[in-house]
Amino acid sequence: TQLLEQSPQFLSIQEGENLTVYCNSSSVFSSLQWYRQEPGEGPVLLVTVVTGGEVKKLKRLTFQFGDARKDSSLHITAAQPGDTGLYLCAGAYVYKAGGTSYGKLTFGQGTILTVHP
Amino acid sequence: EAQVTQNPRYLITVTGKKLTVTCSQNMNHEYMSWYRQDPGLGLRQIYYSMNVEVTDKGDVPEGYKVSRKEKRNFPLILESPSPNQTSLYFCASARDRNTEAFFGQGTRLTVV
């Protein structure tokens, strides 16, 4: 079983502050995805990182994939109340059995972010 | 509109009464999967399917069954539901294991 440890589990900050969410594993992933989930909805993809050391930016959000493809981070600059939500990392793991290629997507526990005005 | 549709959205049932949660996607995706979401545990994969007739267990498969007879549908079957299967369930589909997973709206199941 591939485990993804996501931290912190809860984050409560003031508008304008910066924050970082971490996702760590002992397993190597073929890709790492970050999702955001609103109450009553399914998760929605923010970004996918594939290459070790890759950095992607999405406005005020910066995503990084570790060199060894075992960890990732999400950094938000100048957080806003609209950033409030549940953030999830998910690692894609590929393996072969009996000549067939299988793939699993393992999620971290999630980070509940609250940004106060 | 590209979407993953789950039904029902809400379900209350009694212990031992077989139920099926349906999932359908209209994006011609090969990869489909089921997750349950519980507080503090995140999303845990129950079963997934790489293609028609190809399924495999996820991290928490006990008490669940799936089938993938056609590409668009991936129903989740609880043969004999128990209270510990009370949870929020999500179906998802993706073009392949590395690409974006599109999630359904979720099914909130309560087993009493």
Image (spheres, coloured by chain):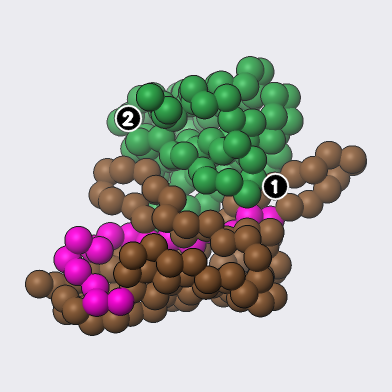
Determine the residue positioned at 56% across, 38% down.
Answer: B94
Residue A116: x and y, percent? 14, 72
**Amino acid of disc 2:** Arg
Residue A111 occupies which quadrant of the picture? bottom left
Position of A38 with respect to B5 (left or right) is left
Residue A28 visible: yes
Q: Which chain is brown?
A: A
Please give the range of residues in magenta. A77-93
How crowded pointer 1 is (Cα within 10 Å; few <14, some 14-19, many 20+) is rated as many
**Amino acid of disc 1:** Gly
The quarter of the image holding the C terminus of chain B is top left
Position of A29 with respect to A22 (left or right) is right
- In reply to whether residue A18 is colored magenta, the answer given is no
Determine the residue positioned at 73% across, 52% down.
Answer: A94
Determine the residue positioned at 28% across, 60% down.
Answer: A85
Judging by the rendered image, the residue that carries numbered circle 1 is: A103
Residue B17: x and y, percent? 45, 24
Residue nearer the viewer, A107 or A78: A78
The quarter of the image holding the N terminus of chain B is top left
How crowded pointer 2 is (Cα within 10 Å; few <14, some 14-19, many 20+) is rated as some
